[in-house]
Image: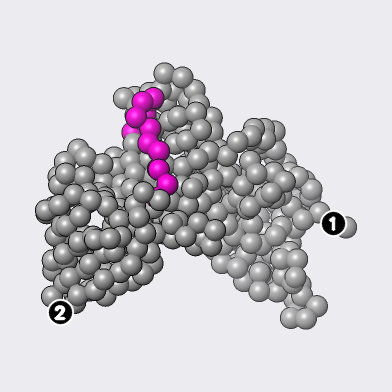
Amino acid sequence: MKLLILQEKLKQGLNIVERISSKSLTLPILNNILISTEKNFLNLSATDLEIGVRWWVLSKVEKQGSVTIPSRLLSSFVNLLPNGNVALESKNNNLSVKSDNYKTEIKGLSAEEFPIIPTIADGESISLDSLTFCRDLNQVADIPVPSTTRPEISGIYFSFQKNTITIAATDSFRLGEKRIFLKSSSSLTKEYSLILPQKTIKEIVNIFNEKPGELKMYFSPNQIMFECPMEETSHPQIQIISRLIEGDYPNYKEIIPKKYTTRLILDRNEFLNQVKTASLFSGKVNEIKIKVEPKSKKVNISSRSSELGDHQSFITGKIEGEPVEISFNHRFLLDGLQSIKTPEVIFELNNDSGPGVLKSPNDETYLYVVMPIKAT
């Protein structure tokens, strides 16, 4: 392999793919990036056996070939090179890197040892706006937590209808649900449901959240692929392919309250700041108390720590329904408030032991359910 590429382009590709490469003691090849050529394209690939990523760029290829090189070493090295042309040449599983006053040889491993990253050639696909999709994923991406006993809730649930995607995530203490409406041209011929690993979702957001344009999603029975094209050609620039989590996602709809006993409409930023302030005195269990007084249109927020002291504040707003006093984990409440970006927030409560629901007055596509801390 022999080629010439701009340092800026090579740096961009390495920064994308090296995130996926694994720190594996049992399979050292997973620590490496596969560098290969395909006609006039340079291709960089990495995998941890659950997620695979491919990145392409047009380059001046003089000789076809491939080699695998330690990902973090190569990425760190290229990031330090000056702008300008970088010459890459592989020989005997080593990579020669030349740029201005630099001449370096990095030891690698044979490309034949690198795992095959599958692709999805057939099957259905849909097109999404990359920036909008990443923004929507961000509303649920941080909710799941790893679980060996219930691996299905470690991921994020997707339900694909004809013109709608419903995304849901839970850790048993809170739940986020987001609905995405597809363009009519993206209509599916049948319905799908699947569970994607949280790591995959976070990598999609990290890689595509600053890439405006089209993002295509391809389906297969046990894998899914996301792809964006190059600006100058229809050839793919980035592909991410991920395994799916096996199992049935719980029927989360059952825990979403169909009604409420108390409803608040509050200034979102003020409510957020008061919950943050109360969290400073919430003690080891992260508990803050919310007392709603509909007659005075006041919401009292308090917390107590035997070590730090007591805190109280109040916020006014539009309140309807019954008086209620209820406790929440401040961290879960803050996550829900931070996922809503509108000036006001709706907070629906169900007595002193039912789940609370956060949503926006201007966005019916998202809701966040948070379970209370029950008195002992």
Counting labels gives 2
Q: Is residue 267 left or right of residue 36?
A: right
Q: Quadrant of the C terminus?
A: bottom right
Residue 373: % across, % down: 77, 56
Most common secondary structure along the magenta stretch: loop
User: In which quadrant of the rendered view does residue 105 lie?
Assistant: bottom left
Write down the residue under mark 1. Answer: 375
Magenta span of residues: 114-129
Residue at left 74%, top 81%? 308
* Label 1 environment density (alpha carbons within 10 Å; few <14, some 14–19, many ≥20): few
- Return the residue found at the far top: 189
* Label 2 environment density (alpha carbons within 10 Å; few <14, some 14–19, many ≥20): few
Determine if the magenta segment contains residue 122.
yes
Above or below, comparing residue 24 to residue 213 in the picture: below
The numbered mark, 1 or 2, whose residue comes first in the sequence reads 2
Residue at left 20%, top 55%? 1
Question: What numbered label is drawn on residue 101?
Answer: 2
User: In which quadrant of the rendered view does residue 91 lie?
Assistant: bottom left
